[in-house]
Image (spheres, rainbow, N blue to C red):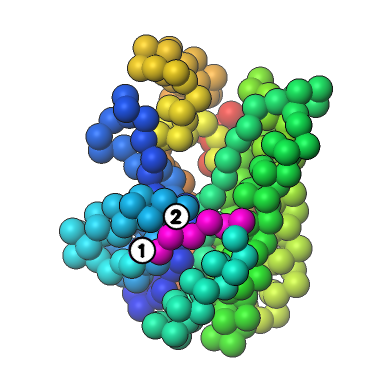
Amino acid sequence: MRLASKIALVSGAGTLKKSFSAADQVGNGAACAIRFAREGALVVCTDRSLAAAQETAAMIRKEGGQAEAFELDVTDTPRIEAVVEEVLRRHGGVDVLHNNVGIEIQGDLLAVTDEAWDQVMAVNLRGAMAMSRAIVPSMRSRGGGSIINVSSTASLKWSPMQFLSYSTAKAGLNHMTRVIARQYAAEQVRCNCIVPGMIRTPHADALYAGEAEAAEGHRIRDARCPMGRQGSPWDIANAALFLASDEAAYVTGCLMVVDGGASL
């Protein structure tokens, strides 16, 4: 198993579905948590919704894996520190940190409000920073570790969906990934970033008001992808597994685009 004996902490490990989402659908964070567990990791599932984190942990345990669940809002620094302290007390350290949390608030330059801008930056950029800040000391003391951030191809180019704050926060996350990677390379703390394109998730369903609108929206999204289809959360999970594993021991500062060619 590629992650045997490793401790992995996943933020945003839950799946919050729309009423019309498929019953067996999982989000990117849940897929990554499940994939890590299938490869032998003990997975700490965290989410702003404790019920969502517990659902993913239960799925892992049902398959015979090891998982725990914690409620964690990444904008709450004292809570981050408390959860990390408890995880370190129980398990001695964290080998893999997967920062999956992200939100969008629609608005171009002339529509975005200060409040929306600050909220998106707090969740999408400061949240990943605060999680990394809390865990890197443990990784350094353990002789290394892997941080995986989740960005978006919206960080690389203009998007027809007008989410200026989201695109900008994700671009900041890309660069923060590189800075952290270079800063701690000598201590074998790796930091890489997955850059997803259009992925068919329950989170994507939230862009639409109802089932019919979602079906048409996903048809359009499929057509925009050079491969003729959106990706799956398992495509993101497979990329995350590589970056988490020792197979990527010499990979750091990478922006791994997983988009079926959509950004080309």
Q: Residue 70 colored magenta?
A: yes
Q: Is residue 241 left or right of residue 73?
A: left
**x then y, percent, for residue 54:** 31, 57
**Magenta-drawn segment:** 69-75
Residue positioned 44% across, 55% down in the render: 47
Q: Secondary structure at mark 2?
A: strand
**Which residue lies at the image location 40% right of the left edge and 75% below the top edge?**
6
Secondary element under disc 1, as helix, strand or loop, is strand
Relative to 174, does residue 76 appear above or below in the rendering?
below
Quadrant of the image occupied by residue 99: bottom right
Percent position of residue 177, x then y: 69, 58
- Residue 184 is marked as none
Question: Would you place residue 52 above or below residue 205 in this image?
Answer: below
Residue 153, image x, y percentages: 63, 37
Ranked by sequence position, the earlier of labels 1 and 2 is 2
- Please name the residue shown 65% across and 27% down the image: 106
- Where does the C terminus fall, quadrant-wise? top right
Membership of 18 in magenta stretch = no
Q: Amino acid at mark 1?
A: Ala
Q: Are marks 1 and 2 in contact (CB under 8 Å)?
A: yes
Picture coordinates of residue 113, whole percent (x, y) = 76, 31
Q: Local crowd at mark 1 within 10 Å, few (<14), some, or many (≥20)?
A: many
Quarter of the view holding residue 259? top right
Left or right, residue 214 beside residue 101: left
Residue at numbered disc 2: 47
Residue topped by disc 1? 69
Identity of the amino acid at label 2? Asp
Q: Which one is in front, 240 or 169?
A: 169
Q: Residue at x 35, y 78 (%)?
A: 5
From where the camera sits, is residue 60 visible? yes
